[in-house]
Image: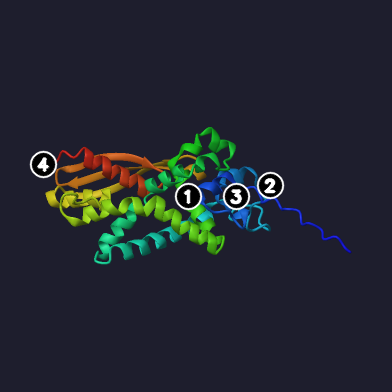
Amino acid sequence: MATRRTKEPTTPTAAHPLEVLLHHQFADPKLLQLALTHRSYAYEARGAPPENTLFPKQKNPPGTDNEQLEFLGDAILGLIVSEALFRAFPESSEGELTRMRSALVSRKRMADFGAALALDEHLLLGKSAELNNGRRKPALLANAAEAIIAAMHLDGPAGREALHTLIDTHLIFPELAAMRAALAGDLNHGALRDHKTLLQEKVQATAAGKLRYIDISQSGPPHQRLFSVEAQLESPSGTRTLASAEGPSKKEAQQRAAELALANWTIPE
């Protein structure tokens, strides 16, 4: 009589530490690795394509860092948040929904999201980015968070399901009560408007002049650009600089300049 052989138990593949926070184990770990690969890392290793590239025939970016995933993740995030707001606020106008979405997917919120996932501990950075304290830069955390969103979406149905839960838990549900309160009355009027919109409304209300944002300079390596802008007010009496600010993009620098201009507003109402 033949003896039945007992099947040896298989040892599950060790999960990446980040997968615990994402509540998702990647079917394709290469996606997660790519989402964590900063341009500086791929640039310094450009002599040969990294093992995590989605396009092995290419020896240089695109396809060897997380920028393409970041592009896709931004769009996916916008769709998920837009649908959630559409369902949660069926009586809100397009403008209100747009402002709520902008608040939920702002660069600051995405940087906070990246920090909550401890992405700084897992980013693959080049030596130059490490020396410039890249792990603590909000822009890098925000970009990596968007890349993670794309990676989870591309990893199949289980990844997409986990992604929706992740975004609901970290970005949408914590803000719903505050958004409903802001929509309910005038007490928090302006809570759903961004700083540039609020500043433009104040300028128009006071007939103070014409508001402009002027590009002053840009600095830093290609993967760590820093833009400097000024918020200027043109009036018959001359041009006045309301505030200046820096940011990893012109759009974010303008928002910061507008925020400072509002905080330091001295023009009579």
Question: How are the colours assigned in the image?
Answer: rainbow
Q: Mark 4 to mark 1: distance in Å?
A: 42 Å
Q: Earlier in the sequence, mark 1 or mark 3?
A: 3
Q: Residue furthest front?
A: 1
Q: Mark 4 to mark 2: distance in Å?
A: 60 Å
Q: Earlier in the sequence, mark 4 or mark 1?
A: 1
In x, y percent, where is residue 2? 88, 63
Which residue is more in the foreground, 179 or 205?
179
Q: Earlier in the sequence, mark 4 or mark 2?
A: 2
Other-residue count near label 4 (Cα within 10 Å), few / some / many at <14 / 14–19 / ≥20: few
In x, y percent, where is residue 237? 14, 43
* Mark identifier at residue 47: 2
Task: Name the image quarter holding residue 89.
Answer: bottom left
Which amino acid type corresponds to the residue marked 4 in the rendered image? Pro
Residue placed under numbered mark 1 in the picture: 145
Other-residue count near label 3 (Cα within 10 Å), few / some / many at <14 / 14–19 / ≥20: many
- Give yes or no for contact between labels 3 and 4 (Cβ–Cβ under 8 Å): no
Q: Mark 1 to mark 3: distance in Å?
A: 13 Å
Q: Mark 3 to mark 4: distance in Å?
A: 54 Å
Q: Earlier in the sequence, mark 3 or mark 4?
A: 3
Task: Provide the secondary structure element on which disc 3 rests.
Answer: helix
Q: Mark 1, mark 2: which one is toward the viewer?
A: 1
Residue placed under numbered mark 3 in the picture: 33
Is residue 2 rendered to the left or right of residue 256? Answer: right
Task: Provide the secondary structure element on which disc 4 rests.
Answer: loop
Instruction: Give the number of callouts.
Output: 4
Q: Earlier in the sequence, mark 3 or mark 2?
A: 3
